[in-house]
Amino acid sequence: MLRYIMKRFLMMIPVILGITFIIFAIMNFTPGDPAKLILGEEATAEDVAKLRTELGLDDPFLVRFARYVINAVQGDFGTSYRNRQPVFNEIFDRFPTTFKVAFFGILIAVFIGVPIGILSAVKQYSIIDTISTIGAMLLTAMPGFFVGMLLILLFALKLNILPATGISSWKHFVLPSLAVASVTMATFIRMTRSTMLEVIRQDYVRTARAKGASESRIVFRHCLRNALLPIITVIGMNFAHQLGGTVMIEAVFAIPGLGSHMVTAVRQKDTPVVMASIIFVAVVAGLMNLLVDILYTYIDPRVKTQYTKG
Amino acid sequence: MMSEPILKIENLHVIYKTDESTVYAVNGVDLELFSGETLGLVGETGAGKTTTALSIMRLLPDKIGKVVHGSITLEGTDVLTATEADMRLLRGSTVSMIFQDPMTSLNPTITVGNQIGEVLYLHRPGISHADIEAGVDNILEMVGIPAGRKNDYPHQFSGGMKQRIVIAIALACEPKLLLADEPTTALDVTIQAQVLEMMNELKDKLDTSMILITHDLGVVAQTCDKVAIMYAGEIVEYGTAEDVFNGKNKHPYTKGLFGSIPDFTKKAYRLSPIEGLMPDPTDLPAGCKFHDRCPYCMDICRTQNAPAIREGSHMIRCHLMAAGGKGEAWE
């Protein structure tokens, strides 16, 4: 098992390297001179040329890429062109906010979506199933920022019980989390419903019925664990996605998160910040996937046998 | 024989109703089974054998399968009108079922020990944890699996061992009636004999009655006291194993079944299988259901249901028998 986790860690290295290369190339080959951006419009050609040499911008592309990777491995991701601060200062400042919104959003979505999905499958074609199907379709059709604005309208402006923007107290996180939950919940409902339906038809569920097990025992003891694999995969993927920050929801609620940070950096062509943010998000997503894979082995003993063999 | 049968099925009719069509799966089955007896239920795929067994457990597919007629009495309980809670008490304790495919019949995420223990937990109220463990060890040893393996998961066992575990689950509460739905079909021939022998031993030891569903007449000859031959949802021949295997008369369909088995004591160039296919269960023919495949078909067979002709313990549902037993073609 430990060997497997180590192997997965090592496999992340080429992935991160590949992502780094792609982003570096994109940032490099799109127009805009960082030296000019730093010095401003009024800078002389001389000053610009001097800064370019200082930053090593005149070297060939591959040399610069190699230098970036070597520095990054040693923990030096450079400083922001904009405020001259080490890039990770701001990323680490903003990440907890993004994490909170994503975590509580996914938590709400799981605790509402998964039970609805189960109920929907157990009572297939019933009124409950129909309502949940329609509800899930509605949620899918509504973008997060739209739900966010509706939430602000209702809870902040009409009822005046929750703040609309900012992050200064836990209350500020309620509405953004609900918005994130609304985006992801539909997926969880549909996924849970379809995998549960599949599992309920399995022979071993019939065996459980033939033993005299009650309906709730069948659902929770015999079905749920078998249906969990695809469900946690989807949960993990959505969580990783939300951890990258959601520009729309951050914009609606004026949240200083990772998404808006990245968009600003891209717009300003602040290459070190863009690079560092994307590498950071990639590592987080990779770790998330690893976590899900490790969870697999606790849920399904067959997966564990597979891993411990290799 | 003894006074009251364990199981009594009268005039059972079961349909599967979907949006497109209605399948007439079981059409008037009568059965009786006494304590300790083994009944072989023989027939082609789709003859209604499994449906009959599922009806006894009241585990027909929800909303689709439906008993439209008849009655099933199990140990004095009317299965068709009992509450769901009462049925749950019967399932696993009074009547258990062994399903066809051991590969898919066990839950992959629960240890086999817990899967066996669950039956004890469900049917022995207030049983202690230690007693469950002891019971699991005991039943595992009975089916020939070392008790030390109870913490393993199903995927760590071979097919034959899985079927032994399925049998252990079915027998854990020493049921009065065991429904075995082709218990050996999915197994290797070498394992088949072992499993059958074991089932027979355990059945005798626990004094369980059994309905053995199969299409293998060899298996029936080895294990069964009584035989029912099913065709298109009806029992076309019924009697003791002696009646069916060595009786002087046979239903034409039974004859066909025997003709489909290679016999190495006789010189023959080909097998003589039954021509044609079983009738479409959504659109059963009038008269005797077997008439369009029957080599002895008469005019009356096409229009009128075949009568049940009894001779002692032997029953044959055929016009030919009614016409005096030995017709010209009846050898």
Image: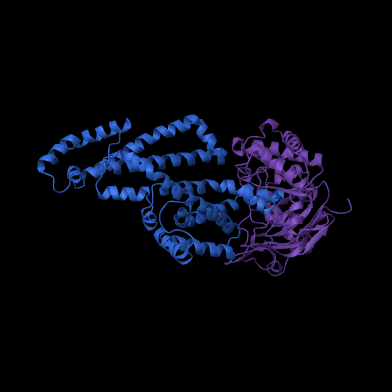
Chain colours: A blue, B purple
Give the image location of residue A297, x and y in percent.
53, 38
Residue B256 horizontal side relative to residue B243, left or right: left
Compared with B231, B120 (above or below) is above
Q: How many marks?
A: 0
In the displayed image of the protein, which residue is found farthest to the bottom? Answer: B303
Compared with B240, B280 (above or below) is below
Instruction: Using the image as rendered, state which of residue A232 and residue B304 is in the foreground.
Output: A232
Instruction: Using the image as rendered, state which of residue B226 and residue B124 is in the foreground.
Output: B124
Instruction: Using the image as rendered, state which of residue B218 and residue A4 is in the foreground.
Output: A4
Give the image location of residue B201, x and y in percent.
77, 38
Residue A192 horizontal side relative to residue A27, left or right: right
Q: Residue at x 29, y 50 (%)?
A: A264
Q: Residue at x 39, y 59 (%)?
A: A145
Q: Residue at x 68, y 38 (%)?
A: B113
> Which image quadrant is residue A142 in?
bottom left
> Which image quadrant is residue A94 in?
top left
Q: Residue B259: in sight, yes or no? A: no
Give the image location of residue B78, x and y in percent.
79, 59
Compared with B241, A120 (above or below) is below
Q: Residue A265: in sight, yes or no? A: yes
Residue A83 horizontal side relative to residue A57, left or right: right
Give the image location of residue B304, x and y in percent.
72, 69
Compared with B232, A110 (above or below) is above
